[in-house]
Amino acid sequence: MIDSVFLFDDAPWRRQLLPLVATRPVSDLRVGINTIAQKWAWYTKNKTIFFLTVDYLRGKYGNSIDQLASAIVIKGNVIPNDRLVEEIRNLSVGTVLMTQGEWIACNIDKLHDFTPLLLSTLRAVEYNDLVRFINYPEDVYRVNAIEITEDLRRNFSDTNSGSLPKHNTYYGDQIKIDGVHSFRGATLNAEEGPIYIGEGAILEDGISIKGPAAICAGARVKTGSRIYPNVTIGPGSTVCGEINNTVIWGNSAKGHEGYLGCAVIGEGCNLGAGTSNSNLRNDWKNVRLYDYASHAYRDTGMQKCGMIMGDFAMVAIHTRFTTGTVVGVGVQVALSGFVPKFVPDFLWLTDTNATNYQLDKFLTMLERAGAKKINTMNPLDSRIFEYQYTDTDYLRKEYLYKLSK
């Protein structure tokens, strides 16, 4: 029996997931409909989830932890499934579940003694079935379609979906609706994958959604939107235009025409009207992404990979992203040409100037935006941004130095 889950990410490997995890634990990443932590909460019947994360995030995410006789610690980038959870439930104290040399979870007798070094002292239990790890940012959309299906299986296993509004066109029977909805003139095609519409979501006239896709609670899909398979629109986000193979965390806006594909967008981002990204090189070679951990470009092994954008990044109208672009937290971009393949966190970039986005001005902007829509600012958030600003200072200095040459 799993009484509590301790999701661990206080390790160097979490840097591979920057900028997406700059402001959150790894297990707070949204994959499918729910975050990784929410998936684990479902399996534990909504018992408290504890985050064993890095120091600067503990003020916001560090739950009060009771001293336990024993504890289950799970690697924070592991996505649960039925078979895996059952195996973890059966772990005895002093054992660690392993797959192909990588640890998944362990059962230890004293939580405060846990460090990654402790794992080598535990008895290894080999797990030979499928495990999904989120090791890199692009993994979020790579497994998103599967996780939409799995989240729906769990969330709707004991209940019926809401009734489908009239005056729309439906294909297939895998359409799940939370709450009462009233929309018309929409086409929802669930023949090849399920479609989820969350409570309070707004679907305007003349939209098309093809599953698997998830429109989460409070999201808005504007007239003319074309949502292709493998798309999650996070809670409170607004979208329009073409979207394919993309996960948007929440409270972000792509409110006008333009293409977004093979992408992961953080929280509170804004993409100006006409903004589009490329996801395929003209020479069909593998796409390379900037990697914070190695401070170099990493081969994704994929021919299609669009862009990764950290929280609260904002770009002007008609912004163009080339294949394999990484944009950091708090970036402001207004360029007439293509955006560089890597834009460091808190950089202000225009045709005529490139400079630091001063942290006090960034925080003031968030306070103004939060009063109207985002409403997430508090002193704990400020300290998180202060850490990330300092941690990425060397990247901005290096970038600006190269521009000056």
Image (tube, rainbow, N blue to C red):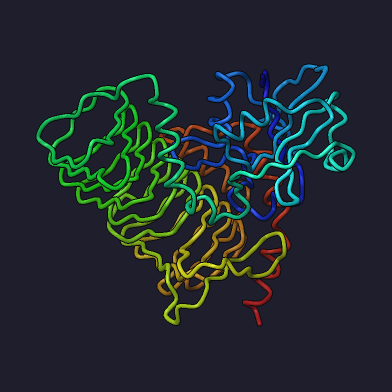
Q: Quadrant of residue 191?
A: top left
Residue 91 % position (x, y): 74, 28
**Does 87 appear above or below 317?**
above
Point out residue 194 in the picture as x, y percentages from the top left corner.
32, 40
**In the visual, does 132 lie left or right of 71?**
left
The residue under the point 22% across, 45% down is 189
Which residue is at a point 60% across and 64% down the rendered structure image?
355
Q: Position of residue 71 (x, y in %)?
A: 77, 24
53 to the left or right of 203? right
Q: Quadrant of the C terminus?
A: bottom right
- Tell me residue 285's x, y (percent): 50, 78
- In this rendering, would 292 be left or right of 201? right
Q: Residue 86 is drawn in which quadrant?
A: top right
Q: Residue at x 58, y 52 (%)?
A: 329
Q: Is residue 363 left or right of residue 191?
A: right
> Residue at coordinates 53% horizontally, 25% vertically from top-left?
42
Q: Nearer the viewer, residue 127 or 7?
A: 127
Residue, far right: 121
